[in-house]
Image (spheres, rainbow, N blue to C red):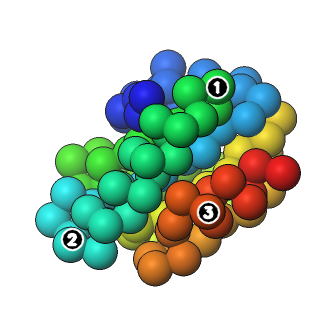
């Protein structure tokens, strides 16, 4: 399951989480739509992993807050792997595949 996040309560839950895949998604980009399919496949195959999504156009301020907090330059689509509240890995665009997400969890 992919959980949409967009506010301060979601932000706090995110940084308090032990393991999260954060997906920054542009709803107007075909490349981001392809990445979304990969993220969705991962989420369906790994229900034990928390997967969150920020729609960057609809929630630009929140997306920018995440980029600033984790000190990761914004990209879209983008995956940020969060472990114990810290961003430990990120990748974007065509690098977002189910296999790459699985590899980032090890």
Report x, y in % for residue 41.
Answer: 43, 47
Q: Find numbered disc 2 in the image and state the secondary structure of the residue it sits on.
A: loop
Label pair 2/1, CB-CB below 8 angstroms: no
Report x, y in % for residue 60.
Answer: 32, 53
The residue located at (74%, 60%) in the rendering is: 103
Q: Nearer the viewer, residue 32 or 98?
A: 98
Q: State the residue position of label 3.
A: 99
Q: Quadrant of residue 19?
A: top right
Report the number of numbered marks. 3
Q: State the residue position of label 1.
A: 48
Sooner in the amino-acid sequence: mark 1 or mark 3: 1
Q: State the residue position of label 2.
A: 29
Q: Is residue 64 above or below residue 96?
A: above
Q: Is residue 84 above or below residue 33?
A: above
Q: Residue furthest left?
A: 28
The residue located at (83%, 35%) in the rendering is: 84
């Amino acid at each position: 399951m992919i959980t949409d996040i967009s506010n301060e309560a979601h932000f706090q839950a995110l940084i308090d989480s032990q393991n999260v895949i954060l997906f920054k998604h542009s709803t107007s980009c075909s490349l981001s739509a392809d990445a979304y399919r990969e993220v969705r496949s991962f989420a369906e195959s790994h229900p034990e992993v928390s997967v969150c999504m920020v729609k960057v156009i609809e929630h630009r301020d929140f997306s920018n807050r995440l980029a600033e907090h984790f000190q990761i330059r914004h990209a879209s689509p983008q995956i940020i792997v969060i472990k114990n509240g810290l961003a430990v890995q990120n990748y974007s665009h065509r690098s977002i595949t189910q296999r790459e997400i699985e590899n980032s969890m090890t």
